[in-house]
């Protein structure tokens, strides 16, 4: 070795210590279940996280042990985010929207030892068949536990390749699978995600993660916030549009993050009621595609939707749609079209779109599967499940289908599992959904393939209309004609009250397919 630099491990204690030393006064605001606001600071959160770490160790938690959380977004969850990894243990964020049997399966698969749970979710624990060694309840015995933990004392030396946290995939295809993040992957992800051309987070920002801390670590935002020193506003269990808008307004939030369905609700309320928001408020949107219309609608309100793509397996930032200067000069229609794409991978991520013929040409037409590789991309699942998800040259197969344009911008057209096969040809359901959600009467649309005696499958669109708006299947058909090949246009448009949601707030197409499995084509 000839390099003369120090070999310093990339571990979370560097971020925690710096936040404690220099960001101590940065505020953390949490909404309690009774809607009151609780205020603390990074200084206090990190100190308490360190106490928690010492308490875990004193209680017998060892390096590599898994400690689960079942909580909403709030300061105590943030303490667990730091306290558990600082003890050398693994932060396992359980998804409170899952069925108790699924949670039990996941906790057993991970071998979770302790659980920290919100009081409001505690009754849920009785329904779990999995028994944790110890359960600490926030709102009941958590404060007492923290007070009983040593206020001083050394913490373990961390290994950068050791486990920091883990999440399970939602199990859209098969059983949920575990992904374990290392200290190193988390630090590198935080550094790159914060860059100006990535999420652009700064100390002057106030950040409201609507995305739950049990959904891919709230996209890594708690770690990024501590790294750069942004004020955090945590919504607790209150994720309805009026509660969120009140927080955005009163706490002078400059950046928020969540899935499109959250922003659809916010847009609808903003169209009816005036709020005094920060000019240029940015909303990071991902988890499913941001409809172009939504991006346009928020521009009207002087709010900027920033579209990003990722997965549990990618920590999650895999691509971001930020217009480079040469594109920012193009006409309005092109700019919106580009912003609705999933964009470019950030530094250190190698993203390819590949089909049987190899990497696709950048012709905006040829499609293939998105493959990805990098220091915060999963190289395997816990237990070695589904090894076929990795290519022989070391890429993770995402299961997403996309094409690439001349600027290298990736545009997802569908998930492989959601593609509709009609008469031997593929129809991309996501593209149809986007177009439908661009219709002025349509609030939400999901398109699924339904078995057909002649064509094997034909598309059916489930549509939710905007309040007070009327339109017919014929109107929607006319809206799609000319934009797509004739055979792409759905044969049926069904108007529904709501589209079922997954535990992460995305459209749950498996439930829709189940609902329409006996559909009779006329
Ligand atoms: P699941 O959707 O199964 O709950 P994840 O939360 O890990 O699992 O979601 C990953 C998937 O979400 C991606 O593979 C992709 O299909 C979809 N997704 C995420 N972000 C976007 C986006 N910006 N546009 C379109 N699809 C997205």
Image: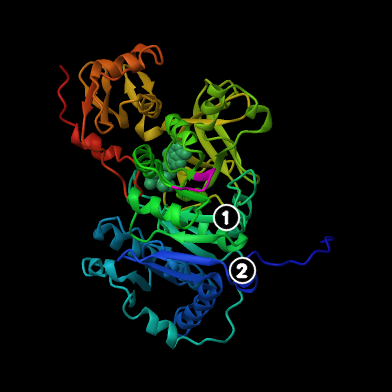
Residue 384 visible in this rendered orientation of the protein:
no
Magenta segment boundaries in residue numbering: 276-283
Mark 2 vs mark 1, CA separation in Å: 13 Å
Q: Helix or strand or loop: what does disc 1 sit on?
A: loop
Dot placed on the residue nearer the N-terminal end, 2 or 1: 2
Q: How dense is the environment of label 1, judged by Cα within 10 Å: few (below 14), some, or many (20 and up)?
A: some
Residue 24 placement: quadrant: bottom right
* Residue 342: image location, x then y, percent: 52, 35
Instruction: Indicate which quadrant contains ligand 1.
Output: top left
Any magenta on residue 279? yes
Q: Is residue 190 left or right of residue 437?
A: right
* Residue 76: image location, x then y, percent: 42, 70
Which residue is under mark 2? 23
**Residue beneath the point at 43% across and 43% down:** 287
Which residue is under mark 1? 205
Residue 347 placement: quadrant: top right
Q: Helix or strand or loop: what does disc 2 sit on?
A: loop
Q: Is residue 322 above or below residue 240?
A: above
């Amino acid at each position: 070795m000839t390099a003369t630099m120090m070999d310093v491990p990339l571990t979370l204690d560097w971020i925690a210590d710096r936040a404690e030393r220099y960001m101590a006064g940065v505020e953390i605001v949490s909404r309690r279940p009774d809607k009151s606001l609780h205020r603390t600071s990074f200084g206090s959160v990190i100190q308490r996280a360190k106490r928690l770490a010492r308490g875990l160790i004193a209680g017998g938690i060892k390096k590599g042990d898994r400690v689960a959380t079942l909580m909403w977004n709030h300061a105590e969850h943030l303490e667990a985010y730091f306290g558990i990894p600082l003890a050398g243990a693994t932060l396992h964020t359980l998804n409170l929207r899952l069925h108790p049997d699924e949670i039990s399966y996941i906790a057993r698969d991970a071998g979770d030892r302790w659980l920290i749970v919100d009081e409001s979710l505690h009754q849920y624990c009785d329904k779990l068949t999995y028994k944790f060694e110890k359960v600490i309840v926030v709102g009941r015995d958590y404060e007492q536990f923290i007070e009983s933990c040593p206020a001083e004392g050394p913490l373990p030396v961390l290994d950068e390749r050791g486990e920091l946290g883990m999440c399970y995939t939602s199990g859209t295809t098969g059983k949920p699978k575990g992904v374990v993040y290392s200290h190193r992957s988390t630090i590198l992800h935080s550094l790159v995600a914060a860059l100006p051309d990535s999420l652009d987070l700064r100390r002057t920002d106030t950040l409201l993660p609507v995305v739950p801390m049990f959904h891919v670590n709230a996209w890594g935002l708690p770690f990024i916030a501590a790294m750069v020193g942004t004020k955090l506003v945590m919504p607790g269990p209150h994720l309805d549009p009026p509660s969120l808008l009140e927080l955005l307004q009163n706490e002078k939030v400059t950046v928020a993050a969540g899935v499109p369905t959250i922003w659809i609700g916010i847009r609808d309320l903003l169209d009816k009621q005036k709020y005094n928001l920060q000019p240029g408020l940015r909303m990071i949107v991902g988890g499913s595609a941001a409809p172009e219309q939504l991006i346009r609608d928020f521009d009207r309100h002087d709010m900027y939707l920033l579209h990003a793509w990722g997965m549990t397996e990618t920590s999650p930032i895999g691509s971001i749609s930020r217009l480079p200067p040469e594109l920012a000069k193009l006409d309005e229609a092109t700019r919106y079209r580009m912003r609705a794409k999933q964009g470019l991978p950030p530094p250190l991520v190698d993203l390819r779109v590949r089909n049987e013929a190899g990497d696709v040409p950048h012709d905006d037409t040829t499609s293939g599967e998105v493959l990805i590789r990098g220091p915060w991309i999963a190289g395997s699942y816990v237990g070695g499940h589904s090894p076929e998800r990795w290519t022989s040259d070391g890429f993770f197969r995402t299961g997403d289908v996309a094409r690439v344009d001349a600027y290298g911008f990736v545009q997802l057209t569908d998930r492989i599992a959601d593609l509709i096969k009609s008469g031997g040809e593929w129809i991309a359901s996501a593209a149809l959904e986007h177009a439908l959600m661009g219709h002025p009467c349509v609030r939400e649309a999901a398109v699924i393939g339904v078995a057909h005696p002649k064509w094997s499958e034909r598309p059916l669109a489930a549509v939710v209309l905007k309040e007070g708006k009327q339109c017919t299947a014929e109107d929607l058909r006319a809206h799609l004609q000319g934009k797509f090949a004739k055979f792409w246009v759905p044969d049926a448009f069904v108007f529904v009250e709501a589209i079922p949601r997954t535990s992460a707030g995305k459209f749950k197409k498996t439930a829709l397919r189940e609902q329409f499995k006996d559909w009779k084509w006329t």
